[in-house]
Amino acid sequence: ELVRQGEALKRTEQMVDKMDQDLKTSQRHINSIKSVWGGLVNYFKAKPPESKPEQNGAPEYYANSRLKEAIVSSKEQESKYQESHPNLRKLDNSDNDFGKADLVSSVQRDSYPKNQHLRAYHQKIDNNLDEMSSGLSRLKNLALGLQTEIDEQDDMLDRLTKKVETLDVNIKSTDKKVRQL
């Protein structure tokens, strides 16, 4: 949603820039209509630069790289989590806990209690804590990416507000000149 809003803000800013350029062109025309001297001044004054034609309306908006990385990482972790979660994974008869017991190293076996049931319980708790840590890490990265994107869009909104206020003053001035003609 933030990326979509960023794209809309970028297009809006480009439209305001185009409106400003059109307004300057119309002011030049008004000056040339108003008097012969205005026409001569416009003739010797440098013409405003032509805007570059944009491809398909507006150039592509690129979201913050930190947000992109967080989204990609989050999707990868989510798919891994869904594969490993007992309620979310597909039932597979070949997947049993006996194979998992072989993966535990001798160092880890020594750190768990000697009782088989307690050892299995501690391993299960450790695995759950690892999954929680991974999920919290994912949420942190997403939050940081979202915050960075929000900050960038806030700056864009500030720029856009200033441009719109300036454009509003110029439109009122141009409207006043047109009414005097």
Image (spheres, rainbow, N blue to C red):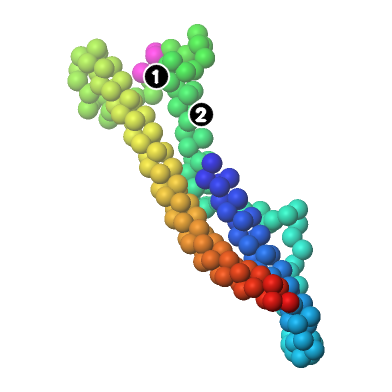
Q: Which residue is mark 1?
A: 100
Q: Which residues are magenta?
A: 97-101
59 versus 177 height, above or below:
above
5 versus 34 height, above or below:
above
Prevailing secondary structure class for the magenta stretch in the rendered image: helix
Q: Is residue 32 left or right of residue 106?
A: right
Q: Nearer the viewer, residue 44 or 149?
A: 44
Which of disc 2 and disc 1 is earlier in sequence? 2
69 versus 161 height, above or below:
above
* Residue at image point 22% right, 27% down: 111
Task: Pick the quarter of the image with the N terminus.
Answer: top right
The reply to whether discs 1 and 2 touch (Cβ–Cβ < 8 Å) is no
Q: Position of residue 141 (x, y in %)?
A: 41, 44
Report crowding for label 2: few under 14, some 14 to 19, many 20 or more residues within 10 A (C-alpha): few
Using the image, tell me which numbered label, if any, was put on residue 79.
Answer: 2
Q: Is residue 148 magenta?
A: no
Amino acid type at circle 1 is Lys
Amino acid type at circle 2 is Ser
Q: Position of residue 48 (x, y in %)?
A: 72, 78
Q: Which element type, helix, strand or loop, lies under badge 2?
A: helix
Q: Is residue 156 left or right of residue 18?
A: left
Label 1 – label 2 distance at C-alpha: 20 Å
Q: Position of residue 169 (x, y in %)?
A: 57, 70
Q: Identify the image quadrant of residue 50.
A: bottom right
